[in-house]
Amino acid sequence: MASLIADGVPPSSILYVAFDEIGSLEKLQDPILLIARWFENKVLAKTFNEGARAGQPAYLLFDEVQNLQSWAPQIKHLVDNHDVRALLRAAAL
């Protein structure tokens, strides 16, 4: 995040989520997509695609995604349908 901010990315364009074995996340259906939608609506106040067209792409940083079931299809859907840059970090399995 510090590197992005140092490169001039506004902090409000960066979402960092650590999925460190938080039990309540298991109860949500498609938590990555839900969190991304919340960020799009409540923080950016525009769609990811609108922001990208305006030269303000969103950066989504997801840590420990392996703790979520079905994380890969959610990420694939997100990057296939939205102009975002996603960085994933998972522990070695």
Image (cartoon, grey):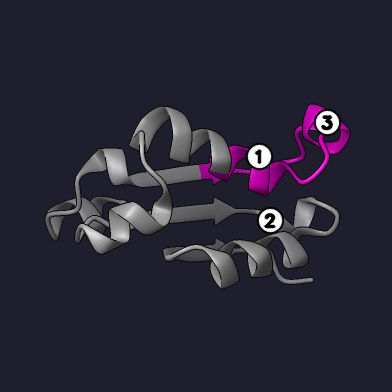
The answer to whether marks 2 and 1 mark residues whose Cβ atoms lie closer than 8 Å is no
Q: Amino acid at mark 3?
A: Gly
Q: Secondary structure at mark 2?
A: helix
Q: Secondary structure at mark 3?
A: helix
Residue span colored magenta: 17-36
Dot 3: within a 10 Å radius of its alpha carbon, few (fewer than 14), some, or many (20 or more) residues?
few
Which of the two discs, 2 and 1, sits closer to the camera?
Answer: 1
Indicate the position of residue 77 as horizontal and vertical percent values: 66, 65
Give the residue pinned by disc 1: 34
Dot 1: within a 10 Å radius of its alpha carbon, few (fewer than 14), some, or many (20 or more) residues?
few
Query: Relative to the observer, which residue lies in front, 28 or 23?
Result: 28
Quarter that holds the C terminus: bottom right
Indicate the position of residue 52 as horizontal and vertical percent values: 30, 61
Q: Amino acid at mark 2?
A: Val
Disc on the earlier residue, 3 or 1: 3
What residue appears at the point 77 percent right and 46 percent down from the top-left corner? Answer: 30
